[in-house]
Amino acid sequence: MKKRALFLVAVMVLLLAAGMAAQQTDRSQCKDHPAFTRMPEYWIYSCQQKQFDSYPFTVGKGKAESVEGQYWMMAYRPQNSLASKPSELQIQRNFAAAVQKQGGAILWSEKSRSTFKLSGDGIEIWAELLTDFTSGYRLVIVQKQGMAQDIVADAAAMGNDINATGHVAVYGIYFDSGKSVIKPESAQAIEEIAKLLKGQPALKLFVVGHTDNQGGAESNIKLAQDRAEAVLKALVNEQGIAPARLRSHGCGQFAPVASNDSEEGRAKNRRVELVKQ
């Protein structure tokens, strides 16, 4: 009996050792991003991909820049069979060298965290590398781009809100972060505002710009004013609306409709509102 018991123990030990030595395979649906290869003998144990999202990339001590666009996250772990794991610094230096070889920039680097940017052929890719010696590393990547607007409030819906409450928020107007130049994907929303005004010749509106709370209060007021003025000019110069029917105003961060503690809330606060005069 003792011999049999010892034999079974030996078999279990061998099976356990074989299991530990087996190569881990990438999680289903997970793969490397085209811009980066992986560290040798690492596998993907978790991943996410979103058509459009935002991520706050660290660009300085206590400073982050939110970038919107197509989103990827890949988390890597070393194989159990890997004899010697690379250090966090070794992983960071490998990625930094790969970025520089592609003509990219290192925007920030500290222990366990690096931020990179790659640009070329009209494409801008941001990446954050987070390292942990015990569990591997994680890459967050955003290919910067505006959201393809699927739903834009039409003139009738905007008119109903204005008649009911005196104002309406318009979320189909886009600007780059910190800028007041209207992006091309805003055209449909601008056209619907013009349609509203043309359908109600007596209607006069305040065009009010709102921001989130990122940045200084005074600069946010100016940014909001500049954005509101840009919308006003688009309605006058491109849509033929009489200037006397419109006035612009910058409210900045002082009338939030959601919490600024999350990116989702900040996105709701970054808006243009039409207010009945």
Image (cartoon, rainbow, N blue to C red):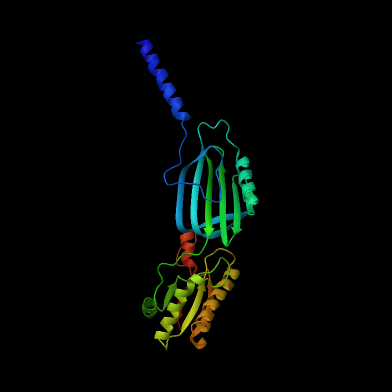
Q: How many marks?
A: 0
* Res. 104 image quadrant: bottom right
Q: Is residue 171 left or right of residue 144?
A: left
* Res. 111 image quadrant: top right
Could you say where residue 122 lies in the image, as x and y percent from the top left? 57, 62
Q: Is residue 3 left or right of residue 190?
A: left
48 is higher (above) or lower (below) than 246: above
On-image quarter of the N terminus: top left
Residue depicted at 52% across the width and 39% down the height: 42
| Nearer-the-camera pick, 219 or 126 | 126
Q: Residue furthest left?
A: 1
| Nearer-the-camera pick, 252 or 88 | 88
Report whether residue 190 is seen: yes
Could you say where residue 246 lies in the image, as x and y percent from the top left? 50, 84
Report whether residue 173 is seen: no
42 is higher (above) or lower (below) than 238: above
Q: Residue furthest front?
A: 121
Could you say where residue 26 lies in the image, as x and y percent from the top left? 46, 41
118 is higher (above) or lower (below) than 246: above
Q: Is residue 94 left or right of residue 17?
A: right
| Nearer-the-camera pick, 136 or 212 | 136
Residue depicted at 59% across the width and 73% down the height: 222
Could you say where residue 127 lies in the image, as x and y percent from the top left? 56, 52
